[in-house]
Amino acid sequence: MNLLFWIYKSRTEKASSAFLMARITHHSKRANINTGLKILPSTWDSKKQRVKGNSELANNVNRHIQTISVRLLSIYDELSKTGKDFTVSRPK
């Protein structure tokens, strides 16, 4: 499983906030999840997948990213240990 954070800025202008998204990829299938957080595109470091700086907002968003990462990886590990199938597609 691969986890990537990115900003959905295709519908935002430079000065406005964009949604922070998480992408889970597993066996060449992927799912995008909206984290519910919005950030300025100019503050996003795509290589580090974190918000730049040490402001309170940057620290809060970066902690939230870490929490999401740990939670998703924990769920994946638990499913792997129990031998249950894991898929990124949503149930119909």
Image (cartoon, helix red, strand yellow):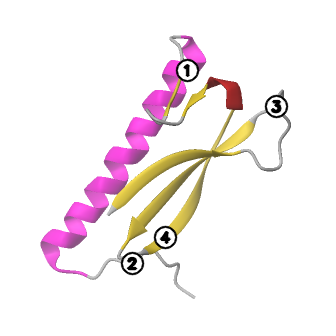
Q: Residues within 10 Å of mark 3 (few under 14, many from 20)?
A: few
> Which of the marked residues, 4 or 1, is nearer the chain's N terminus?
4
Q: Quadrant of the N terminus?
A: bottom left
Q: Are marks 4 and 2 in contact (CB under 8 Å)?
A: no
* Camera-nearest label, 3 or 1: 3
Q: Are marks 3 and 1 in contact (CB under 8 Å)?
A: no
* Camera-nearest label, 4 or 2: 4
> Which of the marked residues, 3 or 1, is nearer the chain's N terminus?
3
Instruction: Give the labeled residue for mark 3.
Output: 14
Instruction: Give the labeled residue for mark 2.
Output: 87
Instruction: Give the labeled residue for mark 1.
Output: 58
At label 1, the amino acid type is Ala
Q: Nearer the viewer, residue 14 or 32?
A: 14
* Camera-nearest label, 4 or 1: 4
In the orientation shown, which residue stands out farthest toward the bottom? 92
Q: Quadrant of the C terminus?
A: bottom right
Q: Residues within 10 Å of mark 1 (few under 14, many from 20)?
A: some
Q: Is residue 61 left or right of residue 16?
A: left
At label 2, the amino acid type is Thr
Q: Which numbered circle lies on residue 30?
A: 4
At label 3, the amino acid type is Lys
